[in-house]
Structure formats: C-alpha cells, structure tokens
Image: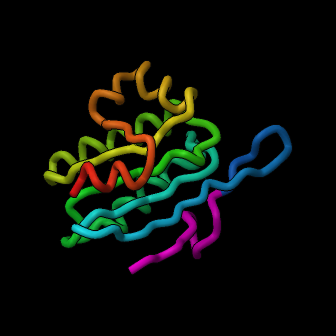
Amino acid sequence: MTSSDRGGAGGEPVRRQNNSRTEPLTLTSERAGGGVLVLHVGGPLDLLTSDALRQQVRARLDDGVRALVLDLEQVSFLGCAGLAVLDELARWAEARQLRVRVVATSHPVLRSLEVVGLDLRLEAAATVEAAVSDCS
C-alpha cells in the first residue's frame, strides 16, 4: 500500500520564502513490508517547515507501524528547528518502542546530525532499501 501526500493544510506543500523564491517541503510516504513506514522528505527542513514534518509523521504512525525510515536524501537545507524536530521524533518513537533510521548521504545533512549528536540516536543508512532491511 502506497500513499503520496504533501505536507500542509489541504494537501498543499508547505512553502518557505528563501531569497524571493518559494521552496516547498515535500513529504511522501510508503509502507514497506514488516510494518516499516518510509517517509521521503524533500526541500528545506527549517523553522517554517519543521512543524509539518512533526505533524505528518505523527499522523501516519498507526498501530501497524513498528519502524520509521526518514529518507532525507532530498533535503536541501537542515536548520536548527529541523534538527530539533528530528530529535523530538526520535525520542517520541523510542518511547513507543519504534525503530527509527534515516537515509542520508549528503555531507551537509550528515554533518548537521553529527554536530548535535543525532547521528548517535538516528542511525544513518545509504539507501532506503538498506534502512528498511535494517528495520526488518
């Protein structure tokens, strides 16, 4: 079962003003086997868009989900608010005994996770397939 959604009210993308251009945060999800929810995140993850990620993750987690994979490969910017939400979601998932993995290979995203110590809580994988396999 696959669903494709964009974060924001009424299915509209969450938009961020950036030097006179608008860049949306995109969120799509899919169910992998074994109760793994994969959430693909694209665009900037910052103060203006991080709440959409929080809401969309929580809205998609139901009783059948036992692991969450956050695909950050298309994240163009990871700000402090985005890092705070990732930390909050990791703690929230851990409290519910859900495994959480991130897919991240870009230096800016990996470095941001390292600087705040999230690389220790959110194990990174190079591909969605590897992260899903690790959660199975």
Q: Determine whether 66 is above or below 50 in the image.
A: below
Q: Residue extending furthest right? A: 20
Residue 2: where, in percent of width, then height? 44, 77
Q: Determine whether 16 is above or below 66 in the image.
A: above
Left or right of 11 on screen, residue 125:
left
Picture quarter with the N terminus: bottom left
- Residue at coordinates 15% horizontally, 54% vertically from top-left? 96
Residue 13 is covered by the magenta coloring: yes
**Stretch in magenta:** 1-14
Q: How is the image coloured?
A: rainbow
Left or right of 63 on screen, residue 102:
right
Residue 30 is covered by the magenta coloring: no
- Residue at coordinates 57% horizontally, 49% vertically from top-left? 49
In the image, 33 versus 110, the foreground residue is 33
Residue 67: where, in percent of width, then height? 25, 57
Residue 52: where, in percent of width, then height? 50, 56
Picture quarter with the C terminus: bottom left
Q: Determine whether 51 is above or below 84 in the image.
A: below
Q: Quadrant of residue 55?
A: bottom left
